[in-house]
């Protein structure tokens, strides 16, 4: 088994308990490590049909913890696959619901679209379950475009309408508009990264950024600024400001910068020997946007006010072997 990404869209008035329970039972019979990450109200209905022994072998994870953010969700799946020493894994999950047309909805679609590339070596089957009653026509089309396999009454079948990363791989000219609530704080990216870190730390602490997020923002900006100095124009800017429900940090590069809005969704992307890069930056923030054109690029970091705790794989980890 290599990575399999399946989409299950059900069209009935009730949760397809029998279908999902059958999927779980088949995985347990095949001795697959099995994880269930659905909304709380659905868990009991799905596991109640399993035997006591089967229930004990299903690892139930809070959906909000798995889907804490696109970057952290992908890292969690990587850690889960690597923790099993090559043994196959089944994850049945209910993706998060975001307002239609929102940044969050778009970025989760990008995340779905790149999974087959990002998790290609993993011996994992991820079954994403969607209630059609809650899907708009646009959302349903996105599910179809991002899952190479669909699940019907007779089981999985190839999806001829699968587009993969091509579905949401275009780089926008500008980030999604957000209303600014308060002053915009500005810093220049110069040759000294330690100086930038000191100035940014003092700025965001004075601006009121929660202390637990100060280190996150400074670490992320340091990585992006290093990219500007090493691979970009060598100069750019940092803008920090407040939106309604989040802190936002824009890092601009006066040259073209990253041209792939999906960069950082694969562990091999932009990793340097010190172990950071856009792969880590996506895990540090809640959402990350890449936009721009030939005259410059902008990476926008979002730090939400209400975030699920970023749980490490060790000591309180999200998945347990």
Image: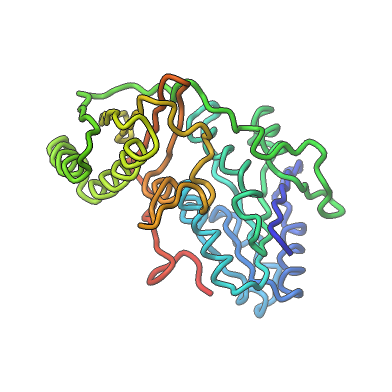
Instruction: Find residue 23 and report its image quarter.
Output: bottom right
Quadrant in which the N terminus appears:
bottom right
Residue at the far right in the pictured view: 154
Q: Nearer the viewer, residue 285 or 172?
A: 172
Left of 264 or right of it: where is 116?
right
Q: Position of residue 313 (x, y in %)?
A: 44, 66
Q: Position of residue 2 (x, y in %)?
A: 71, 61
Looking at the image, is 61 positioned above or below residue 187? Answer: below
Q: Residue at x 54, y 40 (%)?
A: 108
Left of 82 or right of it: where is 248?
left
* Coloration mode: rainbow
Q: Residue at x 50, y 52 (%)?
A: 73
Q: Position of residue 246 (x, y in %)?
A: 32, 35
Q: Nearer the viewer, residue 38 or 234?
A: 234
Instruction: Find residue 22 and report its image quarter.
Output: bottom right
Count every numbered label the image shows and give the total: 0
Q: Position of residue 13 (x, y in %)?
A: 73, 43
Left of 124 or right of it: where is 181?
left
Residue at the far bottom in the pictured view: 53
Q: Residue at x 75, y 45 (%)?
A: 148
Q: Residue at x 69, y 72 (%)?
A: 32
Looking at the image, is 299 positioned above or below residue 316? Answer: above
Looking at the image, is 181 positioned above or below residue 300? Answer: above
Left of 241 or right of it: where is 312?
right
């Amino acid at each position: 088994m290599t990575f399999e990404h399946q989409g299950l869209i059900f069209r009935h008035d009730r949760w397809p308990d029998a279908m999902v329970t059958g999927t779980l039972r088949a995985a347990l019979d095949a001795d697959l490590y099995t994880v269930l990450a659905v909304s709380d109200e659905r868990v009991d209905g799905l596991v109640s049909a399993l035997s006591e022994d089967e229930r004990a072998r299903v690892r139930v994870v809070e959906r909000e913890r798995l889907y804490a953010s696109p970057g952290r969700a992908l890292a969690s799946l990587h850690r889960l696959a690597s923790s099993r020493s090559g043994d196959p894994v089944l994850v049945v999950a209910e993706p998060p619901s975001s307002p239609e047309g929102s940044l969050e909805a778009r970025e989760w679609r990008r995340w779905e679209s790149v999974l087959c590339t990002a998790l290609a070596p993993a011996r994992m089957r991820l079954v994403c379950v969607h209630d059609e009653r809650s899907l708009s026509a646009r959302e349903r089309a996105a599910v179809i475009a991002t899952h190479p396999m669909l699940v019907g009454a007779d089981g999985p079948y190839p999806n001829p309408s699968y587009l993969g990363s091509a579905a949401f791989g275009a780089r926008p000219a500008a980030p999604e508009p957000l209303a600014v609530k308060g002053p915009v704080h500005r810093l220049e990216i110069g040759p000294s990264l330690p100086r930038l870190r000191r100035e940014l730390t003092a700025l965001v602490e004075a601006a009121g950024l929660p202390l637990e997020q100060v280190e996150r923002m400074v670490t992320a900006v340091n990585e992006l600024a290093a990219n500007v100095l090493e691979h970009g124009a060598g100069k750019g800017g940092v803008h920090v400001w407040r939106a309604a429900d989040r802190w936002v940090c824009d890092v601009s590069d006066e040259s073209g910068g990253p041209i792939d809005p999906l960069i950082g969704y694969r562990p091999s992307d932009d990793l340097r020997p010190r172990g950071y890069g856009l792969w880590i930056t996506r895990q540090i923030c809640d959402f990350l946007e890449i936009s721009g054109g030939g005259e410059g690029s902008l990476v926008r970091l979002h730090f939400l006010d209400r975030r699920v705790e970023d749980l490490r794989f060790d000591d309180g980890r999200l998945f347990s072997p």
